[in-house]
Image: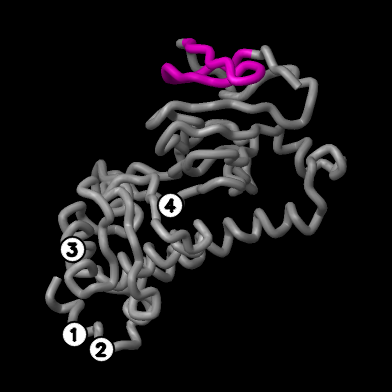
Amino acid sequence: MESTTLAPLARESVFGVGKGIMVHITGSHSDSKAPRDKQTLWSDFTYRRDNEIFGEGEPSNYVYQIKFGAVRTFKLLSDGRRQIGAFHLPDDIFGVESGDIYRFTAEAISETRVQIAKQERLFGGDLEATGFSSKELLMLVAGSLERAESHVLLLGRQNSPERVAAFLMEMDRRLRSPKVLVLPMRRVDIADYLGLTHETVTRCLSALRDWGILGYPDKSHREIVLHDRTQLAHLASGISDNQSRGRLI
């Protein structure tokens, strides 16, 4: 079904109208960045790389599901640093809040298409209209909670190589163990997710390459081949002799 409703955006953005048509607009911020007077539960929007989807403190009226691309949600700390709380990948749901406002800002990491639904309609009882069964909806929300809990544990107990290894294991699992792991996020994003510096992430990835755990098929280093998932898992869990390797970084 074609949609011709325009969404007011805080930043310059691109979103889809109809089948494959890309419309470029610049708008002012309003109480939401989602379509008004929707005729269906879900509406499709496409956001450019680094475009804001919603901001921290804005009314949490809408829920989002990624169709393609990737999204980061983050907070800006009082000292100006950015802490990324989560990376959202295709099929993930984000923007679900128990309160009335979003606790994080959401930005597209790359060109990203999302489906948007009113939160009150998605969880308001008309389950058939959502396109999900109750179990599917529960699993999507529970998956987000599980990733958030794992992220807290990762930040709380692991050293730098273990954090990077755990991140690669997480991405490998979520992307279904591809032959070549294509990471949509930049290293600075990874650093802000892991609570590390960009330089530390780079050194850890170089060490994993030197140890034969991963390799790069091209010079861009955006694609990663995992040569030894078992050793990567051991390093992530901190139960192998790789503990001594961690002191080298």
Q: Dot 2: few (<14), some (14–19), or many (≥20) neighbours within 10 Å? A: few
Q: Residue furthest left?
A: 248
Work out whether mark 1 precedes mark 4 in sequence or the reverse, and give the earlier one. 4
The residue beneath circle 3 is 206
Circle 3 — which element?
A: helix
Spatial CA distance of label 3 from label 1 is: 16 Å
Q: Give the distance between the C-alpha atoms of the residues marked 3 and 4, in whole angstroms.
A: 25 Å
Q: Secondary structure at mark 4?
A: strand
Mark 2, residue position: 241
Residue 168 placement (x, y as % from top left):
37, 63
- Pick whichever of labels 2 and 3 is earlier in the sequence: 3
Q: Which residues are magenta?
A: 6-25
Q: Which residue is mark 4?
A: 85
Mark 3 and mark 1 in contact? Answer it, CB < 8 Å: no
N-terminal label among 3 and 4: 4
Of callouts 3 and 1, the N-terminal one:
3
Q: Residues within 10 Å of mark 1 (few under 14, many from 20)?
A: few
- Within-10-Å neighbours for mark 3: few <14, some 14–19, many 20+: some
Labels 2 & 1 near each other (Cβ < 8 A): yes
How would you rate the neighbour count of disc 4 (Cα within 10 Å): few for under 14, some for 14-19, many for 20 or more?
A: some
Residue under label 1, please give it.
244
Q: Is residue 118 magenta?
A: no
Judge from the rendering whether residue 67 lies leftward or rightward of residue 132; answer left or right: left
Q: Which mark is residue 86?
A: none
Q: Is residue 102 left or right of residue 83?
A: right
Where residue 227 appears, as percent x and y from the top left, is: 33, 70
- Horizontally, is 45 left or right of 246 in the view? right
